[in-house]
Image (cartoon, grey):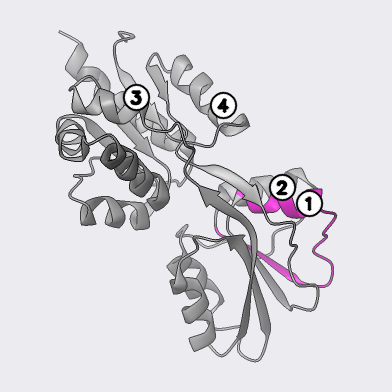
């Protein structure tokens, strides 16, 4: 596969970006790392009095574990395989994981069992109300702890200029916030419409239906949503789909 297949990736500038770049390299693509998220921990931990604790990200798991929190005497629910793997890595056992990796999937999974229970949702400051409202509608007492804030790095946006110039072949968005921050970075540079045009000419992959919905709401056509909500599945599908346009 020619190395000219340039794939923008927007993960935080930590081991997740390192792993993403290594994976894209291994797939024969040329990574364009452009971190659109920066994690600011709050120092908070999940409520120890809850019956259920819901974790929605690898970052949340790692921050709670680093702060010394342990899921003792609670039913631990994870939003999906990546979060579950992170929990397993710190020695925790996940009791509930939905088939559909989304807030709606978690609500569907827990709706029949949480009535009368205290459910703690521990996540970022950009979590969807779908989860809180759905669990409350199911009869749970729902509380939320913000484990970390997600902000856009000041220097984010190099990929928007490539997109605007027509020099980006694919983009791999891993959350609704990465989509929104990409467009905000383009707006800051005065190239929002040109960047949107560039994405329209590129191949766009996203993790999960919520991210697809956000992209489409902003006028971005989505080509790929992998069946498994992991970056590995997303990157593999994106590169496989982008490669044929470079093979004669």
Residue 76 magenta-highlighted: yes
Check residue 231 in the rendering and tell me which mark sits there, or answer none: none
Q: Is residue 121 left or right of residue 236?
A: right
Task: Find disc 1 in the rendering and name its residue.
Answer: 65
User: Residue at the location (34% across, 46% down)?
Assistant: 179
In the rendered structure, which disc, 1 or 3, sits on the residue that comes first in sequence? Answer: 3
Q: Do labels 1 and 2 touch, CB within 8 Å? A: yes
Q: Position of residue 27 (x, y in %)?
A: 42, 18
Per the model, the C-alpha gap separating discs 4 and 2 is 16 Å
Q: CA distance from mark 1 to mark 3?
A: 33 Å
Residue 246 horizontal/vertical position (percent): 20, 13
How much space separates mark 4 and mark 3, taking CA atoms?
14 Å
Q: Earlier in the sequence, mark 2 or mark 3?
A: 3
Q: Secondary structure at mark 4?
A: helix
Q: Residue at the spot x=45%, y=66% of the render?
A: 128
Residue visible at 65% across and 45% down?
85
* Tag 1 near tag 3, CB within 8 Å: no
Residue assigned mark 2: 62
Cα–Cα span, label 1 and label 2: 5 Å
Residue 117 lies left or right of residue 151; in this view the side is right
Q: Position of residue 120 (x, y in %)?
A: 66, 74
Residue identified by numbered label 4: 19
Name the quadrant containing residue 203: top left
- If you read the primary sequence from the N terminus, does the residue marked by circle 4 or circle 1 appear first? 4
Q: Which residues are magenta?
A: 58-79
């Amino acid at each position: 596969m020619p190395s000219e297949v340039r794939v923008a990736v927007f993960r935080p500038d930590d081991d997740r970006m390192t792993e993403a770049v290594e994976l894209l390299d291994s797939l024969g693509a040329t990574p364009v790392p452009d971190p659109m998220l920066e994690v600011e921990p709050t120092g908070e931990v999940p409520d120890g009095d809850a019956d259920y604790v819901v974790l929605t990200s690898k970052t949340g798991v790692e921050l709670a574990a680093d702060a010394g929190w342990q899921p003792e005497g609670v039913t631990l629910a994870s939003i999906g395989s990546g979060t579950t793997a992170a929990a397993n890595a710190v020695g925790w056992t996940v009791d509930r994981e939905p088939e559909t990796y989304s807030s709606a999937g978690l609500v569907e999974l827990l709706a029949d069992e949480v009535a009368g229970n205290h459910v703690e949702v521990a996540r970022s400051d950009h979590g969807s109300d779908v989860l809180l409202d759905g669990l409350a509608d199911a009869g749970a007492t729902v509380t939320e702890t913000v484990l970390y804030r997600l902000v856009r790095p000041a220097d984010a946006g190099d990929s928007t200029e490539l997109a605007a110039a027509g020099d980006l072949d694919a983009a791999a968005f891993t959350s609704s916030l990465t989509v929104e921050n990409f467009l905000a970075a383009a707006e800051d540079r005065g190239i929002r419409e040109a960047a949107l045009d560039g994405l329209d000419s590129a191949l766009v992959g996203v993790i999960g239906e919520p991210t697809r919905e956000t992209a489409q709401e902003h006028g971005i056509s989505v080509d790929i949503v992998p069946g498994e909500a992991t970056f590995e599945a997303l990157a593999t599908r994106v590169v496989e789909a982008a490669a044929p346009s470079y093979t004669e």
